[in-house]
Image (cartoon, rainbow, N blue to C red):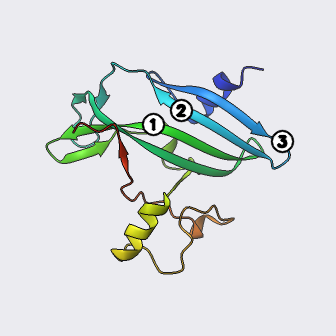
Amino acid sequence: MDYPAIFSATLGLHHPWHIVSVTFGRDERRMDIRLDVFLGNLFTCPCCGKPTPPCGFEEETWFHEDFFGYATYLNARVPQLQCSAGILSADRPWSRTGSRFSRLLPTGAVVTALAAGELEPGAEAGVPHSTSESRVSQPVPALALSRNC
C-alpha cells in the first residue's frame, strides 16, 4: 500500500510539501509522519500574498488523536518568511480549519508562555488530550532552526 500517497492526499499536501517517512508503532497505536519541503521553492506570504523564498526553518510537531485509527504526530520543518509584517511561517496544509491537528508546544515555549501569562498555570500544553476544548491549538513562538531572517 502506498501510505505516503494516501496520507499526502488526506493532509492536503502539494508541491513543495512531501512526506519523508511514515513510522507505525502498532503496539501503542501510534504513527509518526515526517514532512518537509523541497528546497529552492517560493512560498506565498500569508500576510501580503507575495511569493517569498524561505529565510529559515522552524521545527514543529502537530498531533491528531485518531488519524486512520492511530494517534498521529506530524513532525515538519516549516519555512519561515521575511515580510514587511515580520517573520511569518509559511501556510501549512494540515493546519487548515477542521483538520483536527493541534500544534504541540516545545517545553521551552511552554515555560516562556507561562512566564508571559499566555498560558494558564497548570495547563498541560504540548500534551495531547482527549477533548478538543482542552488542547492548546494556538502556536507560541518556538526555537527557530537555520534562520537567516
Q: Would you name the residue on which mark 1 appears?
A: 77
Residue 93 image offset from top left, x and y in percent: 47, 37
Q: Would you name the residue on which mark 3 appears?
A: 26
Instruction: Tell which circle, 2 or 3, labels the residue nearer the N-terminal end.
Output: 3
Residue 42 image offset from top left, x and y in percent: 30, 24
Relative to 45, residue 116 above or below = below
Dot 1: element: strand
Which quadrant of the rendered structure holds the N terminus? top right
Would you call the spot at circle 3 few (<14 residues within 10 Å), some (14-19), or many (20 or more)?
Answer: few
The circle on residue 35 is 2
Instruction: Tell which circle, 1 or 3, labels the residue nearer the N-terminal end.
Output: 3
Please state which amino acid type lies under the numbered disc 3.
Arg
Would you call the spot at circle 2 few (<14 residues within 10 Å), some (14-19), or many (20 or more)?
Answer: some
Do the residues under discs 2 and 1 have CB atoms within 8 angstroms?
A: yes
Dot 2: element: strand
Which quadrant of the rendered structure holds the C terminus? top left
Quadrant of the rendered structure where residue 19 is?
top right
Instruction: Tell which circle, 2 or 1, labels the residue nearer the N-terminal end.
Output: 2
In the image, taking residue 18 as reference, residue 22 lies left or right, namely right
Q: Residue furthest left?
A: 84
In the image, taking residue 45 as reference, residue 66 lies left or right, namely right
Do the residues under discs 1 and 3 have CB atoms within 8 angstroms?
A: no
Instruction: Find the distance from the CA under tag 2 to the CA under tag 3.
Output: 21 Å
In the image, taking residue 86 as reference, residue 111 lies left or right, namely right
**What residue is shown at x 76% (from left), y 37% (from top)?**
24
**What residue is shown at x 39% (from left), y 54% (from top)?**
142
Quadrant of the rendered structure where residue 26 is?
top right
Please state which amino acid type lies under the numbered disc 1.
Arg
